Amino acid sequence: MRGKKTSGLAFELVFLSFIFCVICLVTGSQEAQAEPTSFNFTYTTNDSTDTVVALGDTTTFRSRLDNTGTEADSYVVTMTEKPPTPLSWIIYLCSGGVCHPPSVTKDTVYLPAGEWDSIYVDISPRFCCGDAKVAINVTSLKSPGLSETINFQLRVDCQPTCAPVTNHWGLLILITLLSVAGFYLIWKRSGLARAT
């Protein structure tokens, strides 16, 4: 009787060990087949990045952001102007299907895995000749070490050129000084200066 119980117990242990090994092999192979998650993207353009146009011609620089990773990700799109750009020129950043006001230079674009989005820079050269240099940087939020930049340049080669003003306060002070000088000349010529 005792030998039968011992052999029955040994058989049960061997059978349970076999079942456990089969379960380990099945779950191990499923884990090996599962793709590791990754974050990656490409940021490219097919457009020329250096263009010469006539004054008044709005130019659009197109680029494309592709989520080439296996997970959804959000990307910070930043537009940086490298002075001197003539003050009268208008530069728009378009991303996420929206063209933002000229004051907006940063946006966040969400893309599921395998999706893409167009990023545009519209530059309208008005009144003055000169050039604009704009850098568009894209950085992954899930993997901040992933970052790409494309530099665009638009040139209007003609006369007259305007002195670039990179500070709005400087322009305001210049206008104020010219106004004061103009009023002084009018006051002096009108004879009011002699009367006083």
Image: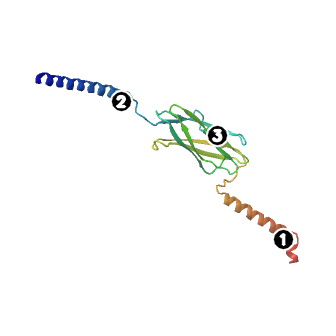
Going from the N terminus, do you reach mark 2 or mark 3 first?
A: 2
Choose mark 2 or mark 3, whichever is in front: 2
Determine whether the residue tagged by mark 2 lies in a helix, strand or loop: helix
Where is the C terminus found, in terms of image quarters?
bottom right
In the image, what residue occupies the spot 61% across and 42% down? 153
Q: Quarter-wise, where is residue 25 in the image?
A: top left
Q: Amino acid at mark 1?
A: Lys
Disc 3 target residue: 98
Q: CA distance from mark 1 to mark 2?
A: 90 Å
Disc 2 target residue: 31
Give the label on residue 76, or none: none
Determine whether the residue tagged by mark 1 lies in a helix, strand or loop: helix
In the image, what residue occupies the spot 47% across and 35% down? 71
Tell me: 160 left or right of 23. right
Determine whether the residue tagged by mark 3 lies in a helix, strand or loop: strand
In the image, what residue occupies the spot 81% across and 66% down? 183
Q: Amino acid at mark 3?
A: Val
Disc 1 target residue: 188
Q: Amino acid at mark 2?
A: Glu
Tell me: 25 left or right of 110. left
What x and y, as percent, mark residue 56? 73, 42
Going from the N terminus, do you reach mark 3 or mark 1 first?
A: 3
Going from the N terminus, do you reach mark 1 or mark 2 first?
A: 2
Q: Which residue is at the front of the view, 125 or 161?
A: 125
What x and y, as percent, mark residue 189? 86, 69
Q: Which residue is at the front of the view, 63 or 48?
A: 63
Q: From what the image shows, is residue 175 above or below residue 7?
A: below
